[in-house]
Image (spheres, helix red, strand yellow):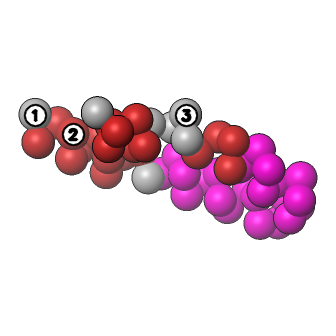
């Protein structure tokens, strides 16, 4: 159960919420993009694992 909760985007947004204002858009924008792109492999893994 904890692995499922950690993999959800619920965990990523607070980190991005802190990182973007602190580091600026130059670092925050690629971090947000990478977080969104990371959801595709996660979805494939969950689908194949299920």
| Highlighted magenta segment, given as a residue range | 16-37
Q: Is residue 21 above or below residue 26?
A: above
34 inside magenta stretch = yes
Question: Contact (CB < 8 A) between labels 3 and 2?
Answer: no
Residue 12 location, quadrant: top right
Residue 46 drawn at (x, y percent): 21, 39
Q: Secondary structure at mark 3?
A: loop
**Above or below: residue 27 compared with residue 12:** below
- Residue 16, percent across and down? 71, 49
Q: Which residue is mark 1?
A: 50
Crowd rating for badge 1 (residues with CA inside 10 Å; few <14, some 14–19, many 20+): few
Marks 1 and 2: CB-CB under 8 Å? yes
Q: Residue at x 53, y 46 (%)?
A: 36
Looking at the rendered image, the quarter that the C terminus falls into is top left
- For label 3, the crowd category at 10 Å Cα-Cα, with few meaning under 14, some 14 to 19 and many 20 or more, is few
Residue assigned mark 3: 10
* C-alpha span from label 3 to label 1: 21 Å
The residue beneath circle 2 is 46
Q: Quadrant of residue 22?
A: bottom right
Q: Residue at the spot x=61%, y=53% of the render?
A: 33
Give me the residue at 51% from left, 37% from top.
9
Secondary structure under the numbered disc 2 in the rendered image:
helix
Q: Earlier in the sequence, mark 3 or mark 1?
A: 3
Residue 48, image x and y in percent? 11, 42
The alpha-carbon separation of the residues under discs 1 and 2 comes to 6 Å
């Amino acid at each position: 159960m904890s692995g499922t909760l950690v993999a959800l985007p619920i965990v990523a947004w607070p980190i991005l919420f802190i990182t973007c204002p602190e580091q600026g858009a130059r670092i925050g924008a690629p971090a947000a993009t990478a977080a969104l792109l990371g959801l595709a492999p996660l979805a494939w893994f969950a689908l194949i694992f299920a």
